[in-house]
Image (tube, helix red, strand yellow):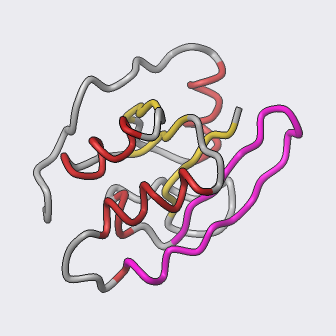
Amino acid sequence: MKIAFPAQEARPEALLDPRFGRAACFLLYDDEQKSWQTIDNQQNLQAAQGAGIQAAETIARHGANVLIAGHCGPKAFRTLLAASIKVYNFEGTVQDGLKAFQANELKPSEGADVEGHW
């Protein structure tokens, strides 16, 4: 299983970025390999629109099965759902989000929790 996190910095100790589509980067944790990969998101930082959709497509291309994020807008959520990526909302650090997920303390999100372009 691969778990994606929108992060403010490229390290597991970093805070989750509250804006999924405009996160500085994504950290992808491979649960089988116990390894981290950084995915750049620079192309979406200044995007006029579509940042969430493009970010969802990016993590899907990298094989993510799960997204743990502070917030997720409606278009990104639909794109993630179409790619069979489960979304969990969490605020804190990437590491703490991973620990909470592994301890089954997070519940899957049933929909977007913010409006687009917030």
Q: Is residue 20 left or right of residue 28?
A: left
Q: Give coordinates of residue 93: x percent, y percent.
A: 54, 48
Residue drawn at the location 62% of the way across and 35% of the way down: 98
Residue drawn at the location 19% of the way across and 38% of the way down: 113
Residue drawn at the location 68% of the way across and 39% of the way down: 2
30 versus 47 height, above or below: above
Q: Is residue 59 left or right of residue 75?
A: right
21 versus 92 height, above or below: below
Secondary structure of the magenta portion, mostly? strand
Quarter of the image for the C terminus: give it.
bottom left
Q: Give coordinates of residue 70: x percent, y percent.
A: 36, 46
89 versus 48 height, above or below: above
Quarter of the image for the N terminus: give it.
top right
**The magenta stretch spans residue 14:** no
Out of 83 and 14, give the one closest to the viewer. Answer: 83
68 versus 103 height, above or below: below
- Which residue, as the protein is rendered here, is positioned at the far top? 104
Residue drawn at the location 20% of the way across and 75% of the way down: 49
Total number of numbered labels? 0
- Which residue, as the protein is rendered here, is positioned at the far right? 33
Residue range highlighted in magenta: 25-44
Q: Give coordinates of residue 91: x percent, y percent.
A: 40, 42
